[in-house]
Amino acid sequence: MTGLREQLESALLRARHRSHALTDCVDDADLVAQHSPLMSPLVWDLAHIGNQEELWLIRDVGGRDPVRHDIDDLYDAFKHARSTRPALPLLGPDEARKYVGQVRDKMWDVLDASRFRGRKLEHDGFAFAMIAQHEQQHDETMLATHQLRKGQALLTAPDVPRTAVPVTDRETVIPAGEFTMGTSDDPWALDNERPAHRVYVPEFAIDTVPVSNADYAEFIDDGGYRRRELWSERGWLHRRESDLEAPQFWTGDGSGRWWRHRFGVLEPVPLDEPVMHVCWFEAEAYARWAGKRLPTETEWEKAARWHPASGRSRRFPWGDEEPDRTRANLGQRHLAPAAVGSYPDGRSPLGVRQLIGDVWEWTSSRFTGYPGFAAFPYREYSEAFFGGDYRVLRGGSFGTDPVACRGTFRNWDHPIRRQIFAGFRCARDV
Ligand code: AVJ
Ligand code: FE
């Protein structure tokens, strides 16, 4: 077991390595460009990562003087919508790199100061871990910007190893009963994952694997996008207004085969991968077509954490041990999800696979606070989004770092969003 200081250091270094890898391969013009109105220029994310680290660790935890006091407003996500960020007087690519480096140097100082006062690091540890999670979340956002950007491929990664074993059991039944949702003792859990609370969940069935591209192509072939009765009222309006006909980045070739653009490469859609880049409304329509529904986030978490033998809720489907490369496709080791049925060692006791990694999974639930929620350290992290038009996503994607992924972790987005690495699995009442 490595010490807290080593864990924090390695999480912070890994995040920074990734932030540089995602920006060093991009030329200056592309770093400041707007690749989609849904996204910030990459150079904004980079400096925002540094600015958040400066606000929380240098100034709040460390009580030190600002590195730069003049740019807080530019990198305040609440003050400027993503679409307007390219027009701001942002730090240029070299300035941004220099800035995040200066902040980082000071941050190590603050961490060292905490280290020599044993209990103090335990107390401050959360703030450092939260900053590592914050940086990794922006790295995943930058990865989505890479996916949206036009032009030649800049990122490479080895193909996903083929570990899929045939899926013979498409569904599993989770028995009715209480379980513990959320956590009060996971030291790095964010405010919206807290506190632990008991929830009664009626019996339900959940798919053992995410919906695949083959499954989804069948829905398309069966007229899924043309059949009004499969869509909710809002979903149908959105489908028509936005001309949705297939997942984002897919194109048909007229002969019934599908192709997709993925990080600058055009390739046939691999039928055995989880479907990805579908919005919540598309997931909802598919589920209705399949005679099922989306799981609630409570059901999802029970499937991922509840251990039938002990009744305990664990951190991950396989237990409490950290994810590794035999259990889940996380951390941008690859640039795609693994085939459905992969990572048999990561399955839950009741046989549910790939809950962690590969693709974020849409749930039917809106984003709200658990009973007893307390905002920490700022209202703006979670609470400001409660009650808004968001749906909860669970489980992380191939682009999510393990530091920001666990059975309790909650992500959220608008139900029309497709640029995130999201798919889904279905559930039903029994
Ligand atoms: C939890 C992924 C929705 O990216 O908007 C980053 C995370 N919060 N900076 C987001 C976040 C502040 C957040 N999500
Ligand atoms: Fe942020």
Image: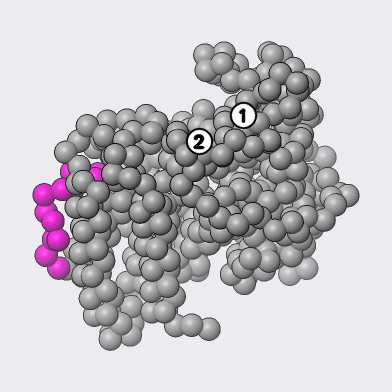
Residue drawn at the location 74% of the way across and 17% of the way down: 223
Q: Is residue 216 above or below residue 102?
A: above
**Residue situated in front as seen by the camera: 32 or 285:** 32
Give the dominant element type of the magenta stretch: helix, strand or loop. Answer: loop
Name the residue located 78 percent from the left edge and 20 percent from the top edge: 222
Q: Which residue is mark 2?
A: 419
The type of colouring in the image is one colour
Q: Position of residue 385 (x, y in %)?
A: 40, 40
Image-based side of 404 in relation to 91, left or right: right
* Label 2: which secondary element: loop
In the rendered structure, which amino acid carries the disc numbered 2?
A: Gln
Q: CA distance from mark 1 to mark 2?
A: 12 Å
The answer to whether any part of residue 77 appears in the image is no
- What residue is disc 1 on? 250
> In this rendering, which labeled residue sits more in front, label 1 or label 2?
1
Outermost residue on the right side: it is: 168
Circle 1: element type:
strand
Q: Is mark 2 within 8 Å of ligand 1?
A: no
Magenta span contains residue 65: yes
Q: What percent of the width, then of the height, locates residue 413?
A: 48, 37
Residue 218: image location, x then y, percent: 78, 27
Q: On screen, 220 above or below 173? A: above
> In this view of the protein, which residue sits in the foreground, 102 or 150?
150
- Quarter-wise, where is residue 119 in the image? bottom left
Amino acid type at mark 1: Trp
**What's the magenta region?**
64-76
Residue 323 image-quadrant placement:
bottom right
Q: Residues within 10 Å of mark 2 (few under 14, many from 20)?
A: many
